[in-house]
Image (spheres, rainbow, N blue to C red):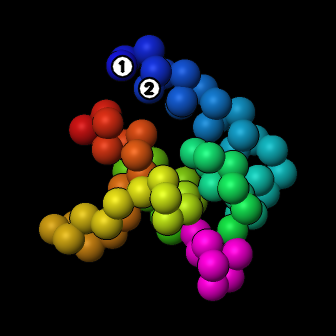
Amino acid sequence: MKQELEEEGSRCLLLSKQHKFNEHCCIRCCSPFAFLLNPKRLCLDCHYNVCKSCCTYSQSERGYICAACQKSR
C-alpha cells in the first residue's frame, strides 16, 4: 500500500506540472470537469482538484478528502 501511495504521489506531481491540467481534469482519474455534471472539489489534504467519484465528504472537517489521502490517513 505504501508503494501504491508513493506511485500515486509521483503521478500527481507529474500531472500537476502540466499547464493547468488540474483546473480542467481530476488529478486522480483524469476525467474532465463539467460545470454541473462533474464539478471539481478541492481535497483538504493534498489541495488537488478531484471529481465526485474520487473523493468523500468529511462531515467533521466540512470538506472533501480524495481517495489517496483517505488511504494515507
Eyeballing the image, is 20 above or below 5?
below
Looking at the rendered structure, the kind of residue marked 2 is Leu
- The answer to whether the residue labelled 1 contacts the one labelled 2, judged by CB atoms less than 8 Å apart, is yes
Image-based side of 65 in relation to 37, left or right: left
Q: Say few, some or many: other residues with alpha carbon within 10 Å of mark 1 (under 14 / 14 to 19 / 20 or more).
A: few
In the rendered image, the residue lying farthest to the bottom is 36
Residue at mark 1: 1
Horizontal side, residue 14 vs residue 51: left or right = right
Identify the residue at the far right of this view: 19
User: x and y percent of residue 57 in the render?
Assistant: 31, 66
Residue bearing mark 2? 5
Disc 1/disc 2 C-alpha distance (Å): 6 Å
In the picture as drawn, the residue positioned furthest to the top comes out as: 3
Give how far across and how far down residue 6 sits, in percent: 48, 21
Residue found 55% across the figure and 62% down from its top: 51
In the figure, residue 72 lies in which quadrant?
top left
Where disc 2 sits, the SS reads helix
Please indicate whether residue 3 sits to the left or right of residue 12 in the image: left
> Which residues are drawn in magenta?
34-40
- 51 within the magenta span: no
Q: Which residue is drawn at 76% across and 53% down?
A: 21
The residue shown at (46%, 21%) is 4
Residue count near mark 2 (Cα–Cα under 10 Å), binned few <14, some 14–19, many ≥20: some
Residue drawn at point x = 44 percent, y = 26 percent: 5
Q: In which quarter of the image is the C terminus?
A: top left
Instruction: Please give the label number shown on residue 18.
Output: none
Residue type beneath disc 1: Met
**Is residue 44 at least partly visible in the picture?**
no
Residue 29: % across, % down = 62, 46
Quarter of the view holding residue 39: bottom right
Quarter in which the N terminus is drawn: top left
